[in-house]
Amino acid sequence: MPVVSHRSVCPLDCPDTCSLILDVQAGKIVGLRGDSEHPMTQGFACVKMARYPERQNHPDRLLQPQLRIGAKGSGQFATVSWDEALDRIVDRVQANVQRYGAASVLPYHYAGTMGLIERDHPLAFFRALGASELDQTICASTGRAGWEASYGPGKLSTPVQSITQSRLIILWGINVLRSNSHLVPWLKKARHQGARIIHIDPYHNETSRFADQHISINVGTDAALALAIGGYILRSGLEDRDYLQSYATGLDQYRTACEAWPLERAAKVCGIPEANVLELAQAIGQERRTFIKVGYGMSRNEGGGNAVRAVSLLPALIGAWQHVGGGGALSYSGAFQLNQSRYSGKHLQQPNRPVVNQSQLGQALAARTPTGEPQLSTLFVFNSNPAAVAPDSNSVRAGLSREDLFTVVLELFQTDTADFADILLPATMFTEHPDMYCAYGHYYLQWAEPIVQAPENCRPNSWVFRQLAKRLGLTDPVFQWSPQEMAQELLDAQHSFLSGVTWQRLQQDRSVKLNLPDDFRPYTQGSHFADKKIRFSPAPQQVDFEVQPSAEYPLRMISPPGAFIVNTTMGNVPSLLKAAGGQPSVLIHPDDAAASQVEDGQMVRVISATGQIERRAQVTTEARPGVLVVVGQWWPKLA
């Protein structure tokens, strides 16, 4: 049989949102590579997606609806038909809604796919039902809040192509070689044209080795460093006074906050030489074409929002947004001003619905009403694996083990979360359903068609919830829309960025750049607030950790993404697990290893007040003293 190539889009939670070329032979995916014609993908795929055919053809894929027959967490199931599975779900949902109320139903979901339809359309079902809302706090919410507190709603960033004109590039709190690899060719072009690249991160990783300089700061001290830099710029008169006079407010409060962080104090708190702080402040203050890539890593602690604010205000302080190659980036997602009013059921949202913090799932599952009834009676999990990724996993697993909790899981494989399901439904892969993709690392909107037929009994998320809506008598027209009709609805928007981005064009070209000028410079004319003023007040602050190291727990731990697993996606692909070392590891500085009498290669337990894990010790100076580095999120059942 001949090999036929098809274009598609990577569904992973990654800023690159790559255009892919997949090779199909006899209905089977046999190869995958990056699209050489796409300006951002540039012909290469990351190591994870290069192995996607192995995942697509994995022998352990779920192929039939399943009904639990063993204890929760045992992973014991019997095959049932789709009709029986859906009928059982409807019966339990109706009974639980009648007894506990619709708010006792919770969807738990995140970014297992970034396709808008299969990610968000299921929410229409829950909003029509009157279920509780999920506050998606597990990843980007703190960073988003920090950025938008300064610049207003709708995050924009310096176009990737413009970075080649940068002269100073700061990669702050991100390992771009692993988490944003398609930015690297542009960084190389910038370096070839004279740019200097500095990496700021507690962990010495691939990007540290790629950069011209690595500044390894203490975990959670990003705001202190940024405020010290801001103070130096203001004291030296290096700020862009004209830009600030036109487009800034609150500078007096910001100046006061910066004065609290002289270079010497910041250096001590950050754990770096004072000369490093001075040199960095001078470099930023003297170069208007400074580009700062702000990583979400710095936002994932108590002071994360303040850290993002403190760092992201530096381009405004020097007026870098006005210059091609200057500015910064956290996310590009605010440019995709699609019509999202109906496809995810926002028009169906009922007032005063309870909101459950995604990062507190364990607490929510344990919560009781004043009358002693469970706060949550029914849990639907799709596009996520909370038993492996949700914080305080012991309490999450305890909640999932409740016999009175009815749990439905839509999955591709028998994950740790799937083991706790009452009903387990086999989902489709991105190659088997159509979808639309925005990006948070560039300005291209993309559409993907199915390129292989799904296994006979695997179904898209959107199909499952449309079927449940029908059985429960939910009649809003949104439940009748096809994926193509949803795409047309999304594109029925009036924003200038979408001018000329039509359904016909997207369907034909598959990838369409938003309607932005080639030299687009966001925030050149101020913020997205009504008065156009960038908010320097309330001034960002350095926020210390609530829990400090102690004699019992003397170390901190960070868990950055690894090269071979995205969250827990790809966590069961044999070749990737082998490439990752065959078993999960923890990086330990030699001083800490000696203090704990740990040798390289030894199995160790990493213990905190909320739980423990076992890892193979890797003794290395890539970890800072006092900081353990656990790279990647392995499936607990396979770790």
Image (cartoon, rainbow, N blue to C red):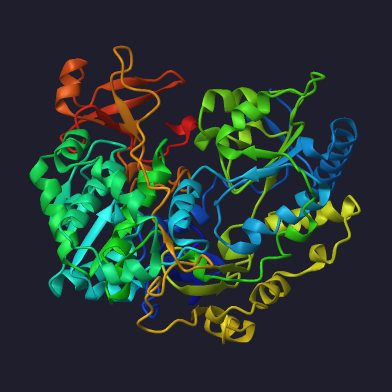
Determine the residue located farthest toward the left in the rendered image. Answer: 275
Residue toward you, 231 or 454: 231
Determine the residue located farthest toward the top in the rendered image. Answer: 551
Residue toward you, 564 or 444: 444
Q: Is residue 620 visible?
A: yes
| Residue at x-position 37% and y-position 29% | 545
| Residue at x-position 69% and y-position 24% | 367
Which of the 4 quarters of the picture holds residue 464? bottom right
Image position, residue 435 (x, y; %): 61, 67
Which of the 4 quarters of the picture holds residue 160? bottom left
Is residue 378 positioned above or below 205 on the image? above
| Residue at x-position 18% and y-position 69% | 167
Left or right: where does residue 613 sit relative to residue 204? right
Residue toward you, 12 or 130: 130
Q: How many marks?
A: 0
Is residue 379 positioned above or below 162 on the image? above
Residue toward you, 118 or 454: 118
Determine the residue located farthest toward the front in the rendered image. Answer: 252
Left or right: where does residue 270 sit relative to residue 444? left
Left or right: where does residue 494 sit relative to residue 16? right
Is residue 401 positioned above or below 292 on the image? above
Image position, residue 38 (x, y; %): 40, 77
Q: Is residue 185 visible?
A: no
Image position, residue 436 (x, y; %): 59, 69
Image position, residue 483 (x, y; %): 70, 69
Which quadrant of the figure contains the C terminus? top left
| Residue at x-position 61% and y-position 71% | 338
Left or right: where does residue 204 sit relative to residue 253? left
